[in-house]
Image (cartoon, rainbow, N blue to C red):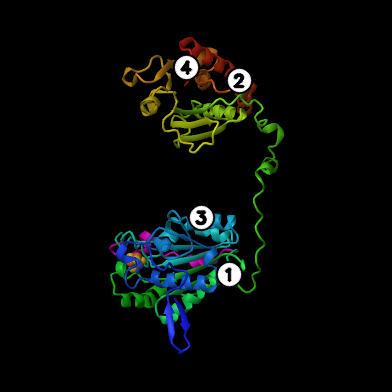
Amino acid sequence: MSSELTSDYTVVHTKSKAFYERYERKDDLQHQTHFCPGCGHGNIHKMLASAIEELGIKDRTILVGPVGCGVFTYYYFDVGNVSAAHGRAPAVATAMKRSSPEGIVISYQGDGDLSAIGTAEIVHAANRGERITVIFVNNAIYSMTGGQFAPTTLIGQKSTTTPGGRSAATEGYPLHVCEMLATLEAPVYIERVGLGDNKQITQAARAIRRAVENQVRGVGFSLVEVLSPCPTIWKMTPVEAQHWVRDVMEKTFPLGVFRDRTREAQPLPQQKPAPPLEEIPGILGVADADLPEGNAHAMEGSREVDLQVRIAGFGGQGVLLLGEVLAEAGLDAGLEVSWLPSYGPEMRSGTSNCHVRLSRQPIDSPLVAMPDVLVAMNEPSLRKFDASVRPGGWIIYNGEAFPREYERADVHVLARPFTRLADELGDPRASNMVMLGALLGIADVLPQASIDAALRRLVKNPRWVALDERALDRGRKIYKEAHEGVLP
Ligand code: SF4
């Protein structure tokens, strides 16, 4: 709220200019917030808006909103607004602040968001001393979702998931976020305030302003925890809820300053900008010999390429390596490429698959929903992905015969016992390269030199390189014997 003294000594209170004039909500609700009567969020919003207005930072403020009752910050604050996934606001705020150091980035979070699912994010953001401001609204319960117990729920407090009251023996003790973060070296300012009476509210407004001002001064991480009434879930009147903050909640969460290095803190030096892309190989020490020789084997002409491949099998069958060799060869040939692996937690015999795209155009998504070619290294993979192959595409199947029930009239099929064929070459584990050879025969979009270079970069053992080369060759021949032509 802004206050003005007019020439006739009248005090005029107006809405802060950091708020939108009208809230773009449902038609008949554009003049009011979605908060319940007596909810602390409304007061905290006003305090934050006043701080933003008074500090003259509206045009460079970015508010990172939470999941929870505070989710709709973007309806109210006329600043940059970003919504973060549950608990992730400090991580999002970190990224925003680091990429826009001149911005004033404020993470606004409730206790379900910050002290439960987001515990790791807030601890590490504070420990890194990120130059952000965090407003932590603690009402000791999950409110938006109907009143489940939160890490901040008081001992004995009833919730839908602790109907008999929270017990230290089963749910542990209330988490004291300010005290916990105050054990860290980096934070500059940590204070807990309350909305239990007018005196507390005045102090809360001061603390919020200071936490924002610290960021304007560039001195480091600041967090203000606000004990806030939630009359609806606490099943109290607004007045009872306000008194409960002061008379009950405050006993578990004492108010006070837990860290204040605001005065002595000096503005931190500007963070170093990220190095230009071309310097990164040198920094990583992978320049020259380790890197592809910049389109050394670039393909002639401007032939269109847009190949989408799905490779699937069991872990240990070389599914991911097959995809990697394909993607690496595409990179060597100067194409845009993506390689997206997906596998279960088991080291062996779990499912494993990957998506590979090669294109002359920038790739919009690494996901391959309708592959041109499916490489199915076993029957479960065929069963899972055969229907996704685009009409006119190919299925390369590792089996004596293609199972009848998966036959489709609109796709080409190449079914061979690739494992046995690889065994004949010297090792059944080379079946992935025999299948890759068949795939390269079908797609025919890569120069041999790029495939050779990719293989040598990814396979270090010379014995395996020699075996894989034979396997690739065998795969190409298998395709040639079976079919002629290339993919459209
Ligand atoms: S449920 Fe509680 S926290 Fe949510 S808007 Fe209502 S009073 Fe506020």
Work out whether mark 4 precedes mark 1 in sequence or the reverse, and give the earlier one.
Answer: 1
Q: CA distance from mark 1 to mark 3?
A: 19 Å
**Which circle marks residue 418 in the picture?**
4
In this figure, which residue is indicated by the disc labeled 1? 214
Task: State yes or no: discs 3 and 2 in contact (Cβ < 8 Å).
Answer: no
What segment is highlighted magenta in the picture?
A: 162-184
Q: Amino acid at mark 2?
A: Gln
- Location of residue 303 with respect to 479 vertically, above or below: below
Q: Name the front one of labels 2 and 1.
A: 2
Q: Amino acid at mark 4?
A: Phe
Quadrant of the image occupied by residue 345:
top left
Helix, strand or loop at disc 3? helix
Magenta segment includes 178: yes
Q: Secondary structure at mark 1?
A: helix
**Disc nearer the start of the sequence (2/1):** 1
Q: CA distance from mark 3 to mark 2?
A: 44 Å
Query: Of marks 3 and 2, which one's residue comes earlier in the chain?
Result: 3
| Mark 4 vs mark 1, CA separation in Å | 65 Å
Task: Return the residue at label 3.
Answer: 92
Mark 2 and mark 1 in contact? Answer it, CB < 8 Å.
no
Q: Indicate which label's residue lies in the foreground, 3 or 2.
A: 2
Q: What is the spatial separation of the Cα atoms under label 4 and label 2, in whole angstroms?
A: 21 Å
Which amino acid type is shown beneath numbered disc 1?
A: Asn
Q: CA distance from mark 3 to mark 4?
A: 47 Å
Q: Residues within 10 Å of mark 2 (few under 14, many from 20)?
A: some
